[in-house]
């Protein structure tokens, strides 16, 4: 049941994100006087629709996107010099111009989208992606301010009975060949809260870890709070090979791929984890970091598609960093909602779901800005080109150019649409036959 609840939450939030994305286009278009004839969530057969004013609102059967129809997207033939359609691409462009012109009511040419100034076109076309970014901001704010982020405390969660060599599973049973762990030998217990180490008060797990790693082989007094009273113990951390970490707190690996270790003091204890709310100032920083990470993924998308093909139709194992499609998103949502473990409740699960959906909206923001039609970024690029031509003409005291013939991009838009469709089908197939799991 929890799995289905997670999937349902993901579907509802995803449909809401799609709907708001289209609102981001529709509202500024209407404010600038453009007639919006259709607003739909989904594609394919219409399940429900209702006309309010001059716009038909509705829901379609395939919930994989949405659209708003802005009247007069393409400039008519007379506005762009009556180009001659000699090739199939030219005929496609001319058909697009004719269809766009047919939507313009008599006497309403001034309400056509192509009539807008470049800044207004940019506002309309960027409205959708920016809406996704705002949704991601809100979801991250709910997670960071409402649920908080995981933080290690100075209260001990586990106390190991032996020293497990670096690189081996910490879950394995101790053997006679393993060295006894100094924490257990000194009498530390799960639930103890470390108050001070060698006379130095400690407030965070990072402070305690630094002190332990620096005191290998030395008998050290440590004060813990146990059952409401302070207890003083003497521990002697052993010197053990433990992973070296970079400035971001990630384990370091050498050029040969092997884990880099260093000799440090080792006690054999792990902290309890709680969720602590962050400040409002950290929400934009988290949003910026995730956006940049997504940009890095999208920039390497062709290579990732090649890897996906190789892992799906070959013998290679699919990595956990592989790109996923709508089926993978649903699977992740179900796994997050149904994960079990000590201290995991619905609050933690919901926070994980919201953070995943925030990342999905960031991906929609970044992906839609790719400067190729029919994506929003393609329309943005066309508007910028039109504006640049007019600015150059103004500086050179030349006649103001007419609107850019964006219908010429229709053949490219069809080609990109086919590629995106094929990529979507590949992702669905891969997520079914060779899924990525997170549990």
Image: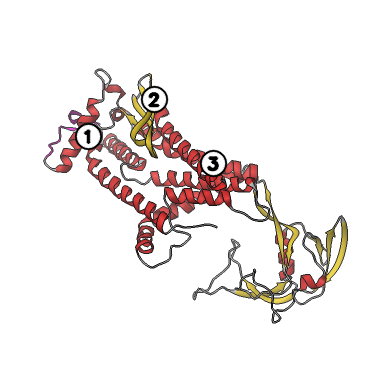
Residue 96, which numbered label?
A: 1
N-term mark: 2 or 1: 2
Circle 1: element type: helix
In the rendered structure, which disc, 1 or 3, sits on the residue that comes first in sequence? 1
Residue at the far front: name it: 1
371 is within the stretch colored magenta: no
Return the residue found at the far bottom.
177
Percent position of residue 29, x then y? 38, 28
What span is in magenta? Answer: 75-85
Real-space Cα distance between discs 2 and 1?
A: 22 Å
Q: Which mark is residue 300?
A: none
Label 1 and label 3: CA atoms lie apart by: 37 Å
Which mark is on residue 137? 3
Residue beneath label 2, please? 30
Dot 3 surroundings within 10 Å: few (below 14), some, or many (20 or more)?
A: many
Tell which of 213 and 403 is nearer to you: 213
Q: Where is residue 327? Give x, y as percent.
A: 43, 49
Q: How is the image coloured?
A: secondary structure
Choose the circle earlier in sequence order: 2 or 3: 2
Q: Quadrant of residue 175?
A: bottom right
Query: What kind of secondary structure does the magenta stretch mostly adopt?
Result: loop
Q: Nearer the viewer, residue 426 or 268?
A: 426
Split into 4 quadrants, where in the image is the N terminus?
top right
Quadrant position of residue 79: top left
11 vs 58, left or right, is right
Image coords of residue 54 (percent x, y): 35, 20
The front one of 50 and 145 is 50
**Residue located 47% across and 43% down the image:** 361
| Element under disc 2 | helix
């Amino acid at each position: 049941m929890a799995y289905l609840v997670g999937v349902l939450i993901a579907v509802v939030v995803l449909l809401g994100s799609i709907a708001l994305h289209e609102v981001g286009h529709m509202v500024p278009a209407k404010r600038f006087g453009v007639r919006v004839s259709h607003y739909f969530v989904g594609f394919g057969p219409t399940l429900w629709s209702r006309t309010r004013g001059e716009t038909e609102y509705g829901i379609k059967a395939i919930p994989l996107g949405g659209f708003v129809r802005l009247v007069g997207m393409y400039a008519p033939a007379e506005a762009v010099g009556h180009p001659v359609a000699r090739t199939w691409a030219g005929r496609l462009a001319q058909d697009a111009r004719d269809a766009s012109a047919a939507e313009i009511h008599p006497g309403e040419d001034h309400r056509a989208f192509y009539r807008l100034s470049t800044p207004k076109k940019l506002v309309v076309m960027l409205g959708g992606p920016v809406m996704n970014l705002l949704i991601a901001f809100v979801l991250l704010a709910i997670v960071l301010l409402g649920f908080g982020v995981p933080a290690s405390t100075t209260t001990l969660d586990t106390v190991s009975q032996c020293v497990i060599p670096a690189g081996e599973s910490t879950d394995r049973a101790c053997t006679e060949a393993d060295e006894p762990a100094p924490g257990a030998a000194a009498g530390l217990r799960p639930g103890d809260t470390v108050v001070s180490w060698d006379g130095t008060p400690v407030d965070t797990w990072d402070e305690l870890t630094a002190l332990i790693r620096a005191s290998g082989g030395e008998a050290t007094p440590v004060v813990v709070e146990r059952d409401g009273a302070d207890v003083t113990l003497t521990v002697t951390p052993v010197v053990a090979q433990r992973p070296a970490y970079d400035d971001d707190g990630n384990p370091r690996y050498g050029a040969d791929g092997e884990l880099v270790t260093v000799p440090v003091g080792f006690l054999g204890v792990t902290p309890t984890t709680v969720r602590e709310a962050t400040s409002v100032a950290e929400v934009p920083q988290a949003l910026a970091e995730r956006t940049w990470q997504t940009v890095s993924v999208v920039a390497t998308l062709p290579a990732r598609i090649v890897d996906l093909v190789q892992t799906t139709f070959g013998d290679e194992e699919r990595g956990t960093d592989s790109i996923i499609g709508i089926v993978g998103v649903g699977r992740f949502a179900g796994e997050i909602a149904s994960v079990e473990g000590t201290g995991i409740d619905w609050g933690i699960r919901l926070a994980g779901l919201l953070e995943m959906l925030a990342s999905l909206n960031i991906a929609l923001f970044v992906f839609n800005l790719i400067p190729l039609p029919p994506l929003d970024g393609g329309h943005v690029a066309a508007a910028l080109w039109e504006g640049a031509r007019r600015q150059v003409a103004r500086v050179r005291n030349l006649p103001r150019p007419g609107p850019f013939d964006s219908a010429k991009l229709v053949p490219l838009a069809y080609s990109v649409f086919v590629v995106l469709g094929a990529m979507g089908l590949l992702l669905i197939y891969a997520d079914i036959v060779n899924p990525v799991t997170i549990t």
